[in-house]
Image: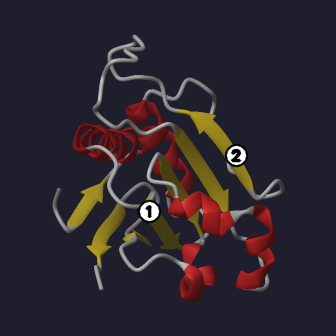
Amino acid sequence: MKKENITSSITQTKKLAEKIAKQIIKKGPEGQAFVIGLKGDLGGGKTTFVQGFAKGLGVKEKILSPTFVIYRKSQIPNPNGQSNPKSQIPKFKYFYHFDFYRTAKPEEILSLGFKEIISDSRNIVAIEWADKIKKIMPKNTLWLNFEFINESTRKITFRKITL
């Protein structure tokens, strides 16, 4: 994955996101949830990215921005389509899609069980407008910044900080 990616269509943005999701699934869970913080202007491609990302995870539900409901939770299917109870390989179980566009204070989301969600290593969490809650985001968040270049072209910059 490059640190800076240029996409010139919705399809390219979704394909990039799908590729990243497949890499994360292949790697498997670690100590806490895998968290992606998306930031950028309104209409910058964040929800489009999350749609492609969810497809890469195998999520079947239609992905809509949860602006008014704050978050949506989807089950991540077993990658090979079968359940193997004997398998000791840890797997991701849930995909959470948060949208904090309407959030005024970071503390508002704590009552939603946010800390528990980001602490569970079986979860993958994508957060639109994550910069609004920066002070309570996990330190190892994968940050994605979306910039307009023109009507259809976006620059998507990745940054992961582990402290």
Secondary structure found at label 2: strand
Residue that protrudes farthest toward the left in the picture: 2
Q: In this view, does 54 lie to the left or right of 106?
A: left
Q: Is 55 situated above or below 83?
A: below
Q: Which of 49 and 74 is in front in this view?
A: 74
Which residue is depicted at the point 50% across and 73% down?
Answer: 39
The residues bearing labels 2 and 1 have C-alpha atoms spaced at a distance of: 15 Å
Q: How packed is label 1: few (under 14 Cα within 10 Å), some, or many (20 or more)?
A: many
Query: x, y (%) of residue 105?
Result: 77, 86
Q: Nearer the viewer, residue 134 or 39?
A: 134
The answer to whether residue 132 of the structure is visible from this angle is: yes
The answer to whether residue 102 of the structure is visible from this angle is: no
Secondary structure found at label 1: strand
Residue that protrudes farthest toward the top in the picture: 82
Amino acid type, mark 1:
Ile
Checking the image for residue 72, the label placed there is: 2
Disc 1 designates what residue? 36
Q: How many marks?
A: 2
Amino acid type, mark 2:
Arg
Q: Is 89 situated above or below 124?
A: above
Query: x, y (%) of residue 85?
Result: 40, 17
The earlier-in-sequence mark between 2 and 1 is: 1
Which residue is depicted at the point 40% across and 41% down?
Answer: 14
Which residue is depicted at the point 56% across and 89% down?
Answer: 135
Which quadrant of the view contains residue 89? top left
